[in-house]
Amino acid sequence: MEALVGLIALFIKIAILGSVYATLVVLIIIILAKFFPDRIFENLLKNKKSLWFTSGFIISILLFGYSFTFWGDHGLGDSARIPLSHFQEIDNTNWIETNIEPVNYPYGAMSIESFSIMEDVVVGTTAVSPVDRPLPYFLWNVKTNYITFFKSEEDYIHHASVNHLAMPETFQTFGENYSDYWNGWRFWMLP
C-alpha cells in the first residue's frame, strides 16, 4: 500500500514539474521569438496551449523515465536509497535498517548506524545485527567495493586524521544523509 501511495505521489510531482517546465519552455520560446524573429518560433507560438501541453507531456515522460534510473530512483514506499559513485548505494528499509553491500563482507548486506559520504569513500559506525558482530568503525571504498574495519574509535581517528577523512562527530544518520542528498535543487528540479 505504501508503494502505491509513493507511486501516486511520484505521478503528482511529475505532473507538477512537467507543467512548470512546460511553462518555462513557452516563456523561453516567447523570449527567443522577440530576439530572433524567425518563422520557426512564430509557428510554435501560433498555438501556445498546444505547445504547453505537448512540451509538458514530453517532459513528464522524460522525468518519469529518469525517476527509474540509478541516479533518479530514491525509493518508493518502505524503501529509500542514496546513490553513490561507481553504481553503489546505501539503502534503507522502513527508515529503520540502513545497509551497504561490500563484496568482502561475508554476510551480504551490512547494517550501518551513522556515516559520512565522501567522494569514493563512506565512513561510519556499524550497527550490531543478530547475524554478526562487526567491528565498530568502518571505511567502505565504493570504487573497489571493499570494506575495512577499525577495532576502536582511536584506531579510526588515527586513520582518519592521516587520510583526511570525516571524524566520528560528523557522522549522520541515514535520514540526515538522505535529506542532504535529495533536498535542495534535487527536490525542486527532479521527481
Image (tube, grey):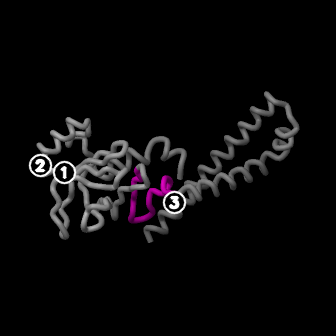
The residue stretch that appears in magenta: 68-84
Q: Classify mark 2: residues with Cα within 10 Å, few (<14), some (14-19) or many (20+).
A: few
User: Looking at numbered disc 1 in the image, what kind of residue is underneath it?
Assistant: Tyr
Q: Secondary structure at mark 1?
A: strand
Image quarter (top left, top right, bottom left or bottom right) of the N terminus: bottom left
Residue 49 location (% of width, % of height): 77, 49
108 lies above or below 74: below
Foreground mark, 3 or 2?
2
Contact (CB < 8 A) between labels 3 and 2? no
Residue tagged by mark 3? 9
User: Looking at numbered disc 2 in the image, what kind of residue is underneath it?
Assistant: Ser
Residue tagged by mark 1? 137
Could you say which quadrant of the image residue 117 lies in? top left
Q: Main secondary structure of the magenta part?
A: loop
Q: Residue at x 44, y 60 (%)?
A: 75
Q: Residue at x 34, y 55 (%)?
A: 145
Asked if residue 48 is among those painted magenta in the image, a careful observer would answer no
Contact (CB < 8 A) between labels 1 and 2? yes
Left or right: residue 30 versus residue 56 is: right
Residue 134 location (% of width, % of height): 17, 60
* Chain-order first, disc 1 or disc 2: 1
Regarding residue 96, the answer to whether it shows in the image is no
Could you say which quadrant of the image residue 113 lies in? bottom left
**Cα gap from disc 1 to disc 2, whole angstroms:** 7 Å
Asked if residue 72 is among those painted magenta in the image, a careful observer would answer yes
35 lies above or below 157: above
Left or right: residue 56 versus residue 182 is: right
